[in-house]
Image (cartoon, rainbow, N blue to C red):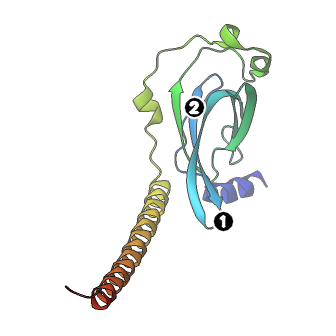
Amino acid sequence: MHALIKQVESQFLKKQVVDVRSGDTVRVHQRIKEGNKERVQVFEGLVIRTDRKESMTSTITVRRIASGVGVEKSFLLHSPLVEKVEITKRSKVRRKYLTYMRARSGKSARLAAVDFDKAAVNDVTDPEAEAELARIHEEQKKEHEMQAAEKAEEVAKLDAKAAEVEARHQENTPTE
């Protein structure tokens, strides 16, 4: 039974995922669809919880203070909506769940930083995600070009109308 579940899950797993740990400060790039437009939103904060790291349902809970209010978001690491996860800082912690950080603010909320190779940790390339990101950028570029062409067309019409009005004005004005 477990082998069958693993086999089905393996089809949907991303090829590589960044090794995120509790205590890391991360930037999560999440694709958001609003109507017929898509954009990428970045959420940066402290990872206070990691769950089921080896599973398809592996999640991280990221906490940040926004306008004086604590905001927590949970992200499925293998979700197609999560573009990428960047680790910006790694801290020394001795627990898996850092729920005590919710009660802290200011200097007491600081964690001791640990040296790590940021480039090596964040060097995870998922060709499918890269292709998807390139496709979104291409669509946005085409949309901008279409809008620019429409604006140019409108300007050309207005110029033609202005020239026509000017010509009529020249005809109607008596010359001395």
**Rendering quarter of residue 174:** bottom left
Between residues 83 and 16, which one lies in front from this camera angle?
83
Point out which mark residue 116 bears.
Answer: none
Quarter placement of the N terminus? bottom right
- Element under disc 2: strand
Relative horizontal placement of residue 157, taking residue 40 as reference (left or right): left
Point out which mark residue 35 bears.
Answer: 1
Relative horizontal placement of residue 65, taking residue 20 as reference (left or right): right
Q: At 44% from the left edge and 27% from the top edge, which residue is drawn?
A: 118
In the rendered view, tell whether residue 98 sits above or below residue 49: above
Percent x, y for residue 42?
57, 41
Quarter placement of the C terminus? bottom left
In the rendered view, tell whether residue 141 sits above or below residue 104: below
Between residues 10 and 64, which one lies in front from this camera angle?
64
Between residues 12 and 39, which one lies in front from this camera angle?
39
| Mark 2 Cα shell of 10 Å, populated few (<14), some (14-19), many (≥20) | many
Q: At 67% from the left edge and 57% from the top edge, which residue is drawn?
A: 7
Percent x, y for residue 3?
72, 53
Relative horizontal placement of residue 76, taking residue 176 as reference (left or right): right
Percent x, y for residue 33?
63, 59
- Element under disc 1: loop
Q: Mark 2 is on which residue type?
A: Val
> What residue is shown with label 2?
26
